[in-house]
Structures are given as C-alpha cells and as structure tokens.
C-alpha cells in the first residue's frame, strides 16, 4: 500500500485495508510519502515492488496530490500486480470481456447482485457517474452481463427520467440526496456507492435511504453496503495475483 500525504479519508481507507488483510492472512506493508514533490520517490518504490517476488499486489491510495501525474504513477505498476484494476492494460482487458482484475467497487457490486440472485440479463441498468474507478467499469460489467445500460453524468438533462427507467440503479456521484424516493420505479434495485460526510462526522450515501426503502425491492446501505464489498474485491484480486 502506497500512501502519499495525509488526506484524512485515505488514512481511514488504508487502516481498513490493513485490518482486512490481517483478518484473511495477507501480509501488507504501508509505504508513506510526504506531499507534493515525492512523485519520483513513489515511482522508484513501485519499480522496486514490481520486481519483489514477495509482493503480489501493489495499491496506490487515491487521491494523489495535485502535482502528481496520476497516469504515470498507475502505469508504473506491473499490470500483473495491479490489484485495484486501474492500469490501462487491465482496463483494456475489462473492455474486451477478459478482465484479469476487475476494479474493486464494481466487482463488489456484482457480487452483491449475484448473492441476492438479482437478474441482470435483459434488465435496464442505470449508472449515475462515469468515473474511471466506479461508473465506467460498472457500466461495462453490467453490459457484459446483458443488461441495457444508461450512464448519467453531471451534464445529463432530465436525470429523473433516466433514473425512473432503472430496474437496477447504481449511484456513484458523491452528492448527498441526489436520488429521492419519487425518482425510483417500484421494485427497483438501488445500489448506493456514494460516501458523503455529514457535519457531525457520520457518513451518508447519494440516495435518500428512507424514502427509497418504500419503493425499492433492494437497497444497499451507507455505511456498510458497497464499502466492505470494495475491500473484499481488493482481497480477492490480491489472492488472484498471488495464484
Ligand atoms: P468522481 O467525483 O470521480 O465522479 C463522480 C461522477 O458523478 C462524475 O462522473 C460526475 O459527472 C457524476 N455526477 C456528479 N454530480 C452529478 C449529478 N448531479 N448528476 C449526475 N451525475 C453526477 O467520484 P467517484 O466515482 O470516485 O466516487 C463517487 C462516490 O462514490 C464518492 O462519494 C466516493 O466517495 C464514493 N466511492 C465509494 C466507494 C466505496 O467503496 N463505497 C469506492 C469509490 C468511491 P461528470 O463526469 O460530468 O463530472
């Protein structure tokens, strides 16, 4: 695990990942780097870890400081150790339907969907958000499973019209209360990826949980829904990388 700077949420995520690794018997090491001017040192560490046979997975905790060239850092990781699935080689494999490592959050969401035996094929899936780590790979994975997919962004007009058509709705916008009960079709499956911090320090998602509970057939809570599944995805990819 490579961590740059002291972004508060990153410290929590790193801690959770270390604990999860401990729980399943994966050995983890954290390398911490200070602020803006440490890109060269981070790249050197990645090169060293790429050739270390003891290390099977390399993860760079995001976000990186603004001064960093994030593509350069991610592309430095050996694709066979890229357990986050962010390297262009792994993104390419995902798009060609032959993913080696799926990005952890969409992977975790597919596991939730499969665990609860939710039918994907032939359904209309709507993904709100198109980030490289959640929205885009999520849409591709749903498409791969034969759903009809709509992707919404901040520039989408009539968001409600699109959302209302969803049999499966995945919301990853990082906007509290973006989706309310009256926007969702009865019986829809609603997966809330968003993590928003409230003034009292507690966390909430992107959907109005209690409002949607009335209409949805399934809804994932925040915290406790997609978050832990993302970590499960990371552990699974690490075991895959080892094998
Ligand atoms: P980004 O900020 O990278 O992307 C957000 C996306 O949402 C963008 O594509 C943006 O559109 C879109 N968006 C923003 N506002 C709206 C709107 N009003 N209507 C429609 N689309 C909108 O975020 P991430 O994808 O990295 O993360 C999304 C959320 O999920 C965050 O809250 C993050 O903390 C959380 N998260 C949770 C994880 C977990 O394990 N539970 C893992 C990763 C993220 P545009 O492209 O046009 O700007």
Image (spheres, rainbow, N blue to C red):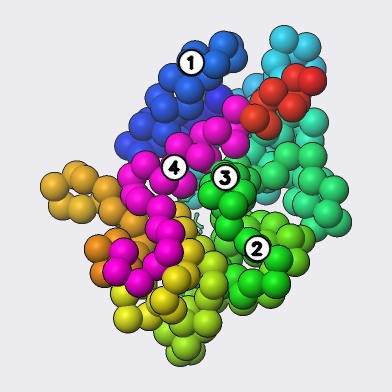
Q: Mark 1 points at which residue?
A: 23
Marked residue nearer the N-terminal end (2 or 3): 3
What's the CA distance linking mark 1 and mark 4?
Answer: 17 Å
Please name the residue shown 75% across and 26% down the image: 241
- Of the numbered discs 4 and 3, the one sitting upstream in the chain is 3
Q: How would you rate the neighbour count of disc 1 (Cα within 10 Å): few for under 14, some for 14-19, many for 20 or more?
A: few
Rendering coords of residue 217 (x, y %): 43, 64
How far is the residue under mark 2 from the one under mark 4?
21 Å
Quick one: 167 or 32, which is closer to the camera?
A: 167
Question: What is the CA distance from the residue labelled 3 to the residue labelled 1?
Answer: 22 Å
**Going 34% across and 57% down the picture, which residue do you hit?**
205
- Residue 228 sits inside the magenta stretch: yes
Comparing marks 3 and 1, which lies closer to the viewer? 3
Q: Where is residue 123 in the image (x, y as percent from the top left)?
A: 64, 72
Earlier sequence position, callout 1 versus callout 4? 1
Q: Can residue 39 be seen in this view?
A: no
> Relative to 216, is 93 on the left or the right?
right
Disc number at residue 115?
Answer: 3
Disc 1 is placed on an element classified as helix
Badge 3 density bin: few <14, some 14–19, many ≥20, Cα 10 Å: few
Q: Quadrant of the N terminus?
A: top right
Element at badge 4?
Answer: helix
Spatial distance from mark 2 to mark 3, Cα to Cα?
12 Å
Element on which disc 3 rests:
helix
**Which label lies toward us, 1 or 2?**
2
User: Circle 4 sits on which residue?
Assistant: 227
Residue range corresponding to the magenta coloring: 213-235
Q: Earlier in the sequence, mark 2 or mark 4?
A: 2
How far, Cα to Cα, is label 1 from label 2?
32 Å
Residue position marked by numbered label 2 in the rendering: 120
Q: Picture quarter containing residue 134?
A: bottom right
């Amino acid at each position: 695990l490579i961590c740059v700077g002291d972004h508060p949420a990153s410290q929590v995520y790193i801690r959770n990942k270390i604990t999860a690794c401990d729980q399943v018997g994966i050995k983890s090491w954290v390398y911490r780097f200070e602020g803006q001017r440490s890109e060269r040192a981070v790249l050197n560490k990645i090169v060293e870890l790429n050739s270390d046979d003891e290390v099977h997975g390399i993860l760079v905790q995001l976000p990186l400081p603004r001064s960093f060239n994030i593509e350069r850092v991610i592309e430095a990781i050996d694709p066979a150790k890229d357990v986050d699935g962010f390297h262009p080689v792994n993104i390419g494999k995902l798009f060609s339907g032959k993913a080696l490592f799926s990005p952890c959050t969409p992977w975790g969401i597919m596991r939730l969907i499969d665990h609860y035996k939710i039918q994907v094929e032939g359904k209309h899936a709507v993904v709100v958000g198109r980030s490289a780590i959640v929205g885009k790979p999520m849409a591709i994975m749903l498409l791969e499973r034969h759903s009809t997919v709509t992707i919404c962004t901040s520039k989408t007009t009539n968001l409600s019209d699109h959302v209302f058509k969803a049999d499966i709705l995945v919301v990853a916008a990082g906007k509290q209360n973006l989706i309310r009960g009256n926007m969702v079709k009865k019986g829809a499956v609603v997966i809330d990826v968003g993590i928003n911090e409230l003034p009292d320090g507690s966390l909430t998602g992107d959907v109005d949980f209690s409002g949607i509970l009335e209409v949805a057939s399934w809804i994932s809570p925040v915290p406790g829904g997609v978050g832990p599944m993302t970590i499960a995805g990371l552990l699974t990819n690490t075991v895959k990388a080892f094998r």
